[in-house]
Structure formats: structure tokens, C-alpha cells
Amino acid sequence: MEIPGYEPFYLHSLDELRAEIARLGLQIPVTDSTEAIFSPRQIAGRTLPNGFCAQPIASRHHQNLADGGFSLIWFAKPTTPLPPSRNRIQIAQLAPPCPENIDDDAVESHLDALVESAKSATAGGFDGIDISCHRGTLAQKLLAAHQRPGRFGGPLVNRMRFLLEALRRIREANPDTILAVRLNAFHACTGGFGVDSEDFRKPDLTEPLTLARALEAAGVSFLNPTINHPNLHGPERQSHPLSDADTPHEHPLIALQRLIRISEDLAKAAPGLSVIAGGFGWLRDFAPHVAAALLEKGPFAMAGFGRGALAFPSGASFRKWPRELVCIDCGACTALDKSENLVGCVIRDGATYGPTYQGMRRTEEDVLSEGLSRCHFCEAAPCVSADPLHTPIPEMISAWLKGNCETARQILFSANPLPGLASRLSPAWMEAEGACIETSLRGISVPILDLQASIAWEALQTGKARLVIPEKPNGRSIAIIGSGPAGLGAAAFLLEKGYLVRLHEKSQILGGMPARVIPARRTGPLDREIESLLEPALRANRLSITLGSEILPGPDLENLRRSVDAVLVCAGVWREPTLGGRGNGVRSGLEFLESFKSGARTSVPDRVAVLAGGDCAMESARVSRESGASQVYVIFEGERSALHWHMPESWFATPGVHAMMEWEPLRYERGPGGDLHGLHLRHATLGTSALLEIDMAIEALGLEPDPRWDFIQNEASEIYFAGGILNGGTSVASCLAEGRAAAAEIHAGLFP
């Protein structure tokens, strides 16, 4: 499959590059020697060993950039900086998004929050703070707010106020903080900042130059310019400029010269600023030759590399860049960035970033069409039989392939109220995709879940992922205990039948175990999906939600039962067996995962044992490995085939991951103070005993329902049960189906 957006690079030497620049009538300098970019420089009171800057991008490989010699590293989403060094400057970019219709009071509130974020970043070890003025940030939008009334709009002096006031207050709070600004100096659309009032394709730098001088006076050290390029195609071209990462509607060298010229003008207008040259991504291995020529010529202080640094983090250590290691300008990192994933080079670091990118590509139209075209549209479709919700899958695929996307959406949502969540969490091989005949014929299923994910996402974006409720209620009310997939599936069914539904949830959020425990990278925007689904019922007062309300057998349940026509219990499974008491290094799987999802815990010790048996084991092992554990031991007393595991088998080949099958955990070894030292084990087949030294144990041995519900299940006819409390926890699709089936049973009993 072709890399989307990739075009082969046709230049093979510096002479060919110079000839192409001349052919286009441009004036981009090129030098044979790259020495200028490797020479030391004095900036912001520091002596930096070279002129290499890693541009702001949300990567997790900042240490690789430091090891590779980059002396200025810009953190797009600051978390924890690298250890301090006199040979390196670390900048934390603060980029608050801009809400719609924001008033002056809200701007002031955002200003306060921004200053507090800057204090936290500098206290955490960052050398400097960047107030970002690009990519839809509040500062950027205020700079272009020509018609906005109030203190932050209209004349340029007002439009600069937010940025300059933030810089002033940050400097006041910490005089040693290095100040920086990432500035979009030419937002190439009608009404954009730095744009000619008569022609959006032409820069007018009158205001950007004034701003640069104001930044110089405010004590800013680094100015990191970026621009948008004019969108020259399409009916809405004046409203949708192109970023440097987009494929330009002109030769890339023309786009590069535009950025160079604008950056030069800014540097000349404010010579006290250290201006960073950039835009070298398309040049491949010729990038340092153009960057060095610009530093030789001046007035630039450093050269910035974004995609180039992701692909080749060791670039600051190489006088000559090998073409086989550099960025090929495929655009995959940009797609990761737009999807708010951690960003890296999919080509040069495929093991890390490839799976995420491939997962994104699976739901794009060209890939879906290719896979769905293999559907046989079986008359007695085995995929439908294996799907717990019995979605009419062939009909849905047929409608989508014919371009009837609305029909496909209706087919899907008529069977599945939360298809986005189900598509992300349901084990494909155990349900519809496992039964697809293409699995037997070719070894790979038709991408049923990917289609569901695509339809669900489009519905969420367009406001169509919601219930359709009848105009009048039917006069009956139902209480549901628990808001996991079973509870939500039941609620959706009953609301669509006209019931008044009272939903009781013991935690402070809806969604049950997926919302509280499963990492967001797997659940996706679950909160938005639930909110969109239930919004019509809430607006019509057909649904009441009580959070922090745990209903258990006893007076509370009796009172609830008397107030409604029926009660449906979807309380799930939250009890986990223990090997012998928790605390002092021993955590339950649910507690462990919930602490990470809430942010209460962010790291783990070096050696972690996961006592496996249920789904929580998989997530716990993965989170442990990603959060600092160098050794993760997955311990299961049965055979590997019996372990419920959703990740690919290749994960067990990850360095530091140990699959210890048929080892039975016996007891913990603790020190005199109760600290965890190790875990005693016995091999089920060999009978061998061993002590495994560990720092933490995560007990994910399986889940059990609360035994307090046992005697109720066979007692009261007005109390129904569904989901994990009955089945011990299965897939999201199964719980949704069981919740809907229980709701249908209730409906049949009340309206025979």
C-alpha cells in the first residue's frame, strides 16, 4: 500500500538542488559545508554546542534528541523535562486552545491559568516557557481578532495584550525563566494575522514586525516563526490555509522560501531576538546544507527541525546525513499529531509508532473500501450469528459501499447504541470477525469492527450518535443500577420505548469499568459517546442520573423498587481475589488501573509481577511496562491458551517482558517492616519452587460479583439482572446485548 501523500524525491545532489532553485527563480542558499550549524553559540546566557533545535512536537523520545546532540529541545506537550544541562535548553510550550465566543473575563481566566502552568513547568525543571501563537491557540486567535470588542480585540495593541501580559507575569514570577514564542506570522486566509487585506495569498508583515519588536522589548529570547501557506484550490480556499505539514499547492521550495523571507524580516526588525529558521522537512539529507547556509548568512541564531528530528534524532551528531535515515516527508507523523497521539517517525521507528498509525489508517475510506470489498454478503451470515448484538452486518457493508452512509449508520445504531466503544474493546476474533468466512479463506477477516468504528466516529462528529425517543412517554419508569455497557444498553432500549429511566451509578462518572479502568487509548472518547447518546433523553426529562449512588440489597433497594415499575441491576464485577492481603507493594488490578486513569499514579517501580487471570492483567502489564518497569512478569498458573489476552503475541517478545505460564503464585516474601521483597512460586508441571524478587505485585486474578446480590437474584420478580453480575464479565458487545435483552424482557412483561 502506498504511503498516503508521499511523492518520490527527485533530487540526487546539491548541484541538482541548486539547479532546481535557480529554475524556479528562487534565492535559497545552499552550502557544501555544514560546519556553521555545528559551531557553538551564545544564546540566553548559555553556551550551546551547536545550532540544532528540535521543533515543538509531541514526541516521547526527547532523550533520544538529547543523546543525538540537539542543544535546544522544544516540548510541545510538556510532561517531565530531561535532567538539567548547561549544554542544553529545554522549552515547555504552553498552547491553550481557544473556546468559541470567549469574553474578556474568560480571557483573563485563561491568562491566570496560563501563568500558573508556566510556574509549574519552571518549577518542574524546564529552562524556558513558550507561549504558542499558532494552531488555533487562544493567543493566535486573539492576534487576528480585528473585529472583536473589548480589551483583547480591535487595535493591535489590544490584540497583543494577552500574549505580552502573560510574558510579563511569567517573567515577574521567575526572572530567570527563558521566554520564547512560537509565532504564526502569516496565517494565510482572509482576516488572518500578517495577511494582505486585499489578497490572502500575500503577506503583510506590518503587524507581525510590530509584535516582534514588542516581544524583544518584553525580554523574549527565542522567536520560533511558523506560517500557514495559502490554500489555492477549492471553493473554501480563503478560509482554510495549509500548514507546513500539509502538501502545498505549490512547489515545496516556493513554500520554503516564503517562510525563510518572513523569518528574516522578523529577525531584522528585532535583532535582539534569537530567531529560529525552519521548514526544512522536504529537503531530506540536504536539510543541514540549507540550514547551515542560512546560519552563515544570518540573521538566524539556530535551525529548527521538526519531522526531520523525529526521523533522525541523531542528526545533530552527523556532518553528513545518510538519506536512508532521514525524513521522507510521508506525512504520517502529522496524522498522529492531529489525532492527539504521541508523535514519532512511523517509517524510522515503525515498531513504536507503526501500530498506532496502522490503527488510524484502518478506518480511512480507501483502506476500508479495499477490505470491505471482500465481503461475500452471505445469506446466513456467520458474522451476524457470532455478533452478540446480531447487527445486520452484510446490509450495513452493502449500504456503505454504495455510498449510503446514513443508511449504514441507521443499521448499526439500531442494533448497537455504543458502536464506537464496542468496536474498540470487543475481541474481534471471538465474535463477528472470527466467524467471517474470509478468515478461513484468506486468513484475514473483512474489517467489520473498523467499519463500525468509522461510522461511529462520523456520527459522533456530526451529532447523529444519539437516541431517538418517542414524542410522549409511555407512563412507566424503570430504575437501572450501574452505568456500564449493560446498564447503558438497557437504558437506550427503554428510553427508545418511551420509559422514564432512573440511572444510579456508584462512581462519579458514567461508563462502568471501561470509563474507570481501561486506558483512554483503548476506550477512545467514551465520555463524549455517552453524552451524545443520552443528551436527547436528558433534554426531554426522560432520564435522571444519580452519581455517587450505590444501591445495595436492603432498605435502599426496597425503597427504589417501590418507586418504579421494575429495577434492573447491572452492577458489574468489581471484586478481585487476593493472594494474601494488599498494601505495601501489592495492588489489585482494578485499583492499579484506576489510579493511572485518574492520574493519582504515574509511575511504577523497576520489577513488577502481574498475577494474571482476567482482562485486567493485560492492561496492568502494558501500563506497567509503559510507566517505568524494566521487568514485567506475567504469572499465570494455567497454560497460555487459557489466559484471556487481547494483545498480539509479539508483545511477549518485548525486552523485559516475561510470560511465566504454569507458575502458581503461593505467597509473598516481606521484610521486617512489611515491605515486599518477592513472590514464592511453584511450577504446576515440574513441581519446582522459586522465589522471584519483585518490587510490586498486581493481583489481576479475575473478577467476581458482589455476593450480597446472590440471594436477591432468585427472589423478586420485579428485579432483573444483566451483564457482568451474571456472566462474570465478558465483552462490551456481550454486555450491551445482555442489557438490551433484559430491557426487552422488562418491556414484554409490562406491555404483553
Image (tube, grey):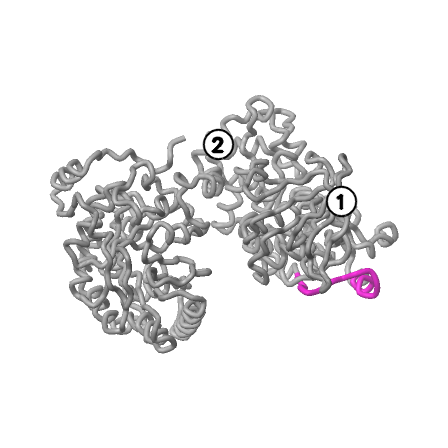
Residue at x 17% of width, y 43% of height: 32
Mark 2 or 1: the one toward you? 1
Q: Which residues are magenta?
A: 544-560
Magenta run includes residue 547: yes
Mark 2 residue type? Leu
Where disc 1 sits, the SS reads: helix
Residue 190: x and y in percent read 25, 56
Where disc 2 sits, the SS reads: helix
> In the picture, which quadrant includes the N terminus?
top left
Residue identifier under label 1: 727
Residue identifier under label 2: 401
Mark 1 residue type? Asn
The quadrant in which residue 331 appears is top left
Residue 303, numbered circle:
none
> Is 671 placed left or right of 624 in the picture?
right
Residue at x 67% of width, y 43% of height: 731
Work out whether residue 746 can be spotted: no
Label 1 CA crowd tier, 10 Å (few <14, some 14–19, many 20+): some
Q: Earlier in the sequence, mark 2 or mark 1?
A: 2
> In the picture, which quadrant includes the C terminus?
top right
